[in-house]
Image: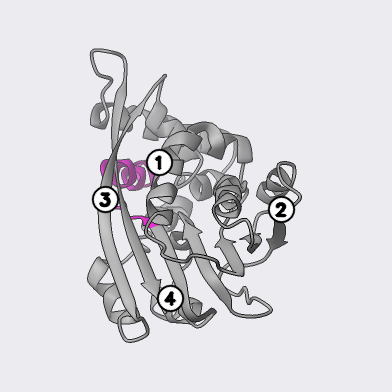
Amino acid sequence: MAWDPKLYSTFAAPRLRPALDLMTRIGAEAPSRVVDLGCGTGNVTRILAERWPGAQVTGVDSSPHMLEAAAQESAAITWTQADMGQWQPPEKVDVLFSNAALHWLGDHASLFPRLAGLVAPGGWLAVQMPHNHYAASHTIMAEAAAAGPWAEKLVPLAGRFPVGDPGFYYDLLAPLAQELDIWESEYLHVLDGDDPVVRWTMGTALRPLLDAVDGDWRQGFLDEYRARIASAYPRRADGKTLFPFRRLFLVARL
């Protein structure tokens, strides 16, 4: 899947807030090794480095385009290209942080215990994942995927519900953790401009579907999604569009 750093960064401010909320719940005082798994363009990685200036900070991402953008902003951080699902640190880390990345990976029943095993005793695993896959932005995506000649290609891609309920992650991590905090928050993003929900999803959930088709099919699917989404997220009297977005958080001290 091709990632566009500029498109993803269009909504950098509302995407940053959950990362900051997650970061405040990490109790590490002076960690030696901090990793941002799925770091993207590195805006959160740089904040991690500012919080723990004495730590060796590494940003890991699978996208060379994202890492190229990240490296332009900071030379003090180590940037590593790797598959998030297979990445292994040279030694266990003190803080393993992942913001809005792990929902792209499957088999969380195996993934999360594996990630916990990469953290040093007394260290922290902190994860935030979108949990809005049943929201209109996603259900309409599935409807649009099924509504044209592109259906055979796009329907399988639109049906992913990768994030489990909080209890699922509790059962995975409670036996491994000294402390475990799991919660959900719904953010009400106030967006500007034309078709802001479409533009938001084009940088994330819509990306694999758009990459799977091209030409008339790509434009036709995007037009179908745009037409259907307008009624679900109407523009308010002041010109703004409200976009509720639910996210799941977990912080484990291991």
Name the image colouring.
Answer: one colour
Q: Which element is circle 2 on?
A: helix
Q: Which residue occupies 34% across, 48% down?
A: 142
- The mark closer to the camera, 1 or 3, is 3
Q: CA distance from mark 1 to mark 2?
A: 33 Å
> Magenta stretch?
129-148
Q: Is residue 110 above or below residue 232?
A: below
Count residues near mark 2 (Cα–Cα under 10 Å), then give few for <14, some for 14-19, many for 20+.
Answer: some
List the residue tagged with mark 1.
148
First in residue order: circle 2 vs circle 4: 2
Residue under label 3: 185
- Could you tell me if the residues under marks 2 and 4 are in contact, i.e. CB atoms within 8 Å? no
Q: State the SS at label 4.
A: helix
Whether residues under marks 4 and 1 lie with C-beta atoms below 8 angstroms apart, the answer is no
Tell me if I can see residue 149 in this picture. Answer: no
CA separation, marks 3 and 4? 21 Å
What residue is rendered at 35% in x and 65% in y? Answer: 250
Residue 235, given in percent of the width and then of the height, sits at: 28, 20
Residue at image position (41%, 42%) is 17
Q: Position of residue 179 (x, y in %)?
A: 32, 76
The residue singled out by tag 2 in the image is 64
Kindly identify which residue carries mark 4. Answer: 112
- Pick the front one: 58 or 212: 58
Q: Which type of secondary structure does the marked residue at label 3 adopt? A: strand
Tell me which numbered mark, 1 or 3, is placed earlier along the sequence: 1
Q: Nearer the viewer, mark 4 or mark 1?
A: 4
Q: Per the image, is 239 magenta?
A: no
Which amino acid lies under the numbered mark 2 shown in the image of this protein? Answer: Pro
Q: Secondary structure at mark 1?
A: loop
